[in-house]
Amino acid sequence: MSKLDEFLAGERHDDVALFLTHEYLDSQGKLPNLGEEVENGYVLVVPGDDGRRAFAAGTGMDAMEFSRTAMGQKGHVDRDLGGGECPDRDPDENHQAEFIFSFSEAQNEEVGGLYARGAVVHAYAHCACGASYSDKWVVGEETETGVQPGESDPAEGTE
């Protein structure tokens, strides 16, 4: 099982995952292609502190500040972290996710909601149009929780 598969299965809570498109990597040139190649780019799974530094080096943004900003708007992030659907999509503009920052949290029944159901993956995406958005889902319930393809509201209704 790859690091990405383990991350998506909720087995790497101390790590973060970073997605960068081929084009973004080529234009920025700051982050080496050390991750797992997906259709539109690369996903790297690295220890949390290293990942936050790599995110800053690759994007020029602080990971946690970016996450806080992206939480203000919901959108679908592909469950393999290889892209997403921008909530501001317009057929006349490029709405490809340029990069994604993701982490997971272990199941926590005391918190309730999604966290009582299982491990939760949080994903924060930045679109080529400049919009940022977020999604989160329960591991093993990816089609029942989070923003589903073509939708703009989380399927579970409560977070």
Image: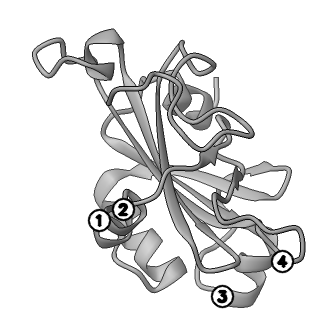
User: Which three-letter amino acid code belongs to the residue tagged 3?
Assistant: Gln
Q: Which secondary structure, mark 2?
A: helix
Q: CA distance from mark 3 to mark 4?
A: 21 Å
Residue depicted at x 45% and y 70%: 54
Across and down, in percent, residue 49 comes to: 29, 60
Q: Which residue is mark 3?
A: 28
Label 1 to label 2: alpha-carbon separation: 5 Å
Residue 11 placement, left or right of 88? left
Q: Earlier in the sequence, mark 3 or mark 4?
A: 3
The span from disc 4 to disc 1 (Cα, nearest Å) is 27 Å
* Residue 32 figure quarter: bottom right
Please tell me how crowded label 2 is: few (under 14), some (14-19), or many (20+) other residues with Cα within 10 Å. Answer: many
Q: Which residue is mark 4?
A: 93
Q: Which residue is mark 2?
A: 67
CA–CA distance between discs 3 and 1? 20 Å
Q: Quadrant of the C terminus?
A: top left
User: What residue sits right under mark 1 in the picture?
Assistant: 64
Per the image, label 4 sits on a secondary structure element best described as: loop
Label 3 crowd (10 A; few <14 / some 14-19 / many >=20):
few
Q: Is residue 159 above or below residue 112?
A: below
Query: Which of labels 3 and 4 is toward the front?
Result: 4
The residue shown at (53%, 25%) is 155
* Residue 145 percent location from the top left of the image: 51, 23
Q: Position of residue 105 (x, y in %)?
A: 30, 31
